[in-house]
Image (tube, helix red, strand yellow):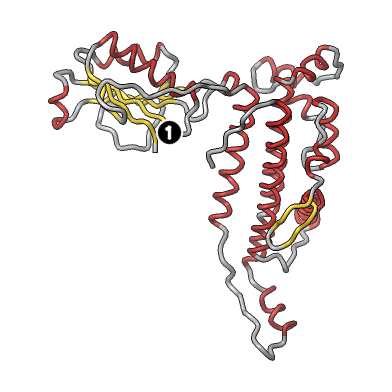
Amino acid sequence: MGRDLTLYPSKASKKELKNLVESLGFVKCSHLWDWPKGTLNYSWFDMEDFKSIDGVSADIYPIKEDKKDKTDNVWALHVRNLFSASFYDVKMLNRLLREARKKFGGTIYGDYGKNRYAPLWEDTSTPISRGISMVYEEVLNRIKKVEFSIPDPKINYESKENDDLTFITSLNQMDPTRDLYNGLVPFAVSAFEFFFSQIFQILLKYDDYSIEKLKNYNQKIDFYDLLLIKENKKTIEGVIAGNYSFQNINQINKAFKEWLGTDIRSILFKKKKIGKNVAFLENKISEIINFRHKIIHHFLFDNELTREKLINIFSTIKISFKEVVNALEDKYSIKIENHS
């Protein structure tokens, strides 16, 4: 679902529409929709200060016969973005329509009626809230996709009265999907690492304390890293993040404490219901990280890892994200959006 609006210009050539679209920073892209032959597809994103979430798509296309009653012009301009788009995305969508209509005349038809633009709202977001929202959204979406794809067991005998429970358990442990479940544990830890690494780098860039600390910070940097920074392929924040391991709670806590004054361990040191049990969140995360280490470095699989237990692992990771997000909302007086 999203915002769909189309301008049917009074008079505008394909080249004129193309020049206007490109002048606003739109770049050519491919498109999944089956557009008419000759269509030009564009997209726009503004990643400065994480202003874009979904961006804007713009399509210059030849008008079909059943739409010729709207204009005598040959070409139309279609714009679209998702309902999860940011304030800045919607603002650009409207800007393109306004400038095109001012220059070429015509009529707008779309989700909000004739000649009506997409409504805007009061934007209270900040670079920190938008950046964290983007990371949070991405990692939750990826986890949800994996959770949706987790197969049911191939072997799943249920014990009955007078059954030998040891024998039934042994049979179920032979289920080949349990190897697949084990293989997804490193993915869970990777999601955990990505979340904390990216959040740390975002906060480094905008947190007042870290900005001041950076002014007097000394660190040797490899010449190769300097070249990457010069080419905008690496950031100062990325270099600093490289000093820590984000697959280790102690290291994560050290990074956040040293640079941001935030105690991650205290945030995670609380009891939470995970599946049917209640446990300390920090302890469960440490267990998952150690589990991943055994799989990656020793090829040790747990034949008792059921689908339910794997789902609980993902739940633990997601709960840890939520606890940290809540704490950061309080610390920075922000609202972190989540459309997942």
Mark 1 residue crowding within 10 angstroms, few (<14) / some (14–19) / many (20+): some
Viewport quadrant of the N terminus: top left
**Residue 64 horizontal/vertical position (percent):** 18, 30
- Position of residue 52 relative to residue 338, above or below, is above
Q: Residue at 71%, 32% (x, y): give it.
A: 328
Q: Is residue 136 above or below residue 129?
A: below
Q: Residue 161: image x %, image y %?
A: 66, 89
Residue in the picture at 39% in, 34% down: 2
Left or right: where does residue 96 sit relative to residue 142? left
- Relative placement, left or right, of 117 versus 128 is left
Expressed as whole percent of the image width and height from the top left, the position of residue 172 reads 66, 75
Q: Nearer the viewer, residue 145 or 36?
A: 145
Residue 134 spot, x, y in % from top left: 59, 32
Q: Is residue 184 left or right of residue 151?
A: right
Local secondary structure at mark 1:
strand
Q: Quadrant of the C terminus?
A: top right
Residue at (16% x, 20% y) in the render: 71
Q: Which residue is mark 1?
A: 82
Q: Residue at x 69, y 91 (%)?
A: 162
* Snapshot quadrant of residue 114: top left
**The one of 260 and 61 positioned closer to us in this rendering:** 260
Q: How many marks?
A: 1
Does 247 sit above or below residue 182?
above
* Residue closest to the far top: 103
Amino acid type assigned to the residue bearing label 1 in the image: Leu
- Kindly indicate the quadrant of the structure image that contains residue 222: top right
Residue furthest to the bottom: 162
Q: Nearer the viewer, residue 31 or 110?
A: 110
